[in-house]
Amino acid sequence: MTEHAPPPEPTGRIVLLTTSHRVAPGLLSWSAWQALRTADRVLCADAGHPQLPYLREAGVDVEHEIPDAHALVEACAGGRTVVVLPTGEGDQRLTDGLARLAGSGRLAMPDLELLPGSYDLPGARLLDLVQVMDRVRRECPWTSRQTHEGLVKYALEEAYELVEAIEAGDREELREELGDVLLQVVFHARIAQEGGPEDEDEPFSIDDVAGDLVEKLIRRHPHVFGDEAAETPEDVSAHWQRTKAVEKQRQSVTDGIPLGQPALALAAKLAGRARAGAPDVGLPRGEGVGYELLELAARAEAEGVDPETALRAAARAYRAAIRAAEGLTE
């Protein structure tokens, strides 16, 4: 009579449960809660881990220890499941130890599962940016002394560098310059959060800035968030202009146009506003290149061409021709 070998003993399972610090503690996925509730042991070396109060409230017993890799494998003997809440630097030693054991072939290894308990939502890294900006503002000797007025030149420089990256078609540069522009927004909002002698009663934060922007986007897109219809870009522009007119209650179509912008862009903006909503006002007549440029800018705007962008493209071509004549390459 042939004797059959006994079935191999179940090797169990190790679950490394990761969570995002950008998501409120206790907000875990269903699979995470299921793993925690059904585990034979739940281990966490950090007694101050932010998830622990919520696990205790849910009736999950957590042991404040992390055995070494060999002991952790032994804890899974008999098919047991051990959930580990990673805590930081010690996690790498644990995972490296498990990898070495698996590679040695000396032990029957339990199943190893990496289980995300919470996920970053889109935009989650913006929370990190706010926290970093807070610390830099407090601790950096240069950053802590900056004012809205002192940062104006940097906002202009970064905007122009962003334009240059877009025109050059350099995506890596575009990504970096977008970050620099975003820094200006977060920096100014952080300063405004502190208030000051001139606006002591009106501090605001980056959340206020973002909240106002969300409300504006919803309000000015009734064809997306409301009942109005828009089939063409022209319909969208009409919605936008009507909503702005109600919001701003401006006396003139020229109100709100920044006079400090580049002259060609200013001329085109004035021409566009006049064409869209002003009484029939012709271009002023005068002598000199300024009036000629004004006429060109108005004509470009009427034809749907941004004269500032068009002139910059022509200037870049001119620059390339000069460099080629000098024997230089881009």
Image (cartoon, helix red, strand yellow):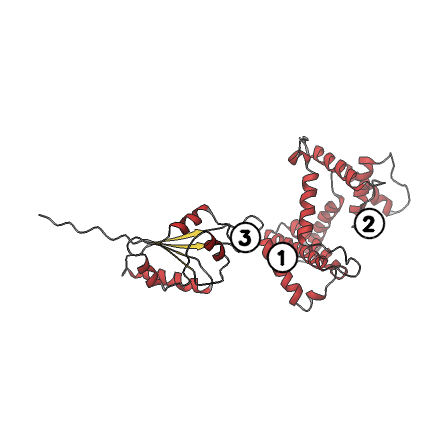
Q: Is mark 1 in CB contact (under 8 Å) with mark 3?
A: no
Position of residue 324 measured from the top left corner of the image (x, y, whole percent): 67, 55
Q: Secondary structure at mark 3?
A: loop
Camera-side residue: 270 or 37?
37
- Neighbour class for label 2 at 10 Å: few (<14), some, many (≥20)? few
Using the numbered discs, state the Cα–Cα distance from disc 1 to disc 3 in whole angstroms.
16 Å
Using the numbered discs, state the Cα–Cα distance from disc 3 to disc 2 in whole angstroms.
45 Å
Task: Read off the residue under disc 3.
Answer: 24
Q: Secondary structure at mark 2?
A: loop
Q: Which picture quadrant has residue 245?
A: top right
- Neighbour class for label 1 at 10 Å: few (<14), some, many (≥20)? some
Using the numbered discs, state the Cα–Cα distance from disc 2 to disc 1 in whole angstroms.
32 Å
Q: Residue at x 82, y 42 (%)?
A: 270
Task: Read off the residue under disc 1.
Answer: 130
Q: Residue at x 76, y 37 (%)?
A: 241
Task: Read off the residue under disc 2.
Answer: 259
Q: Residue at x 68, y 69 (%)?
A: 141
Three-letter residue code for mark 3: Ala
**Nearest to viewer (mark 2 / mark 1):** 1
Of callouts 2 and 1, the N-terminal one: 1
Three-letter residue code for mark 1: Val
Residue 155 in sight in this render: yes
Disc number for residue 229 = none
Position of residue 236 measured from the top left corner of the image (x, y, whole percent): 70, 35
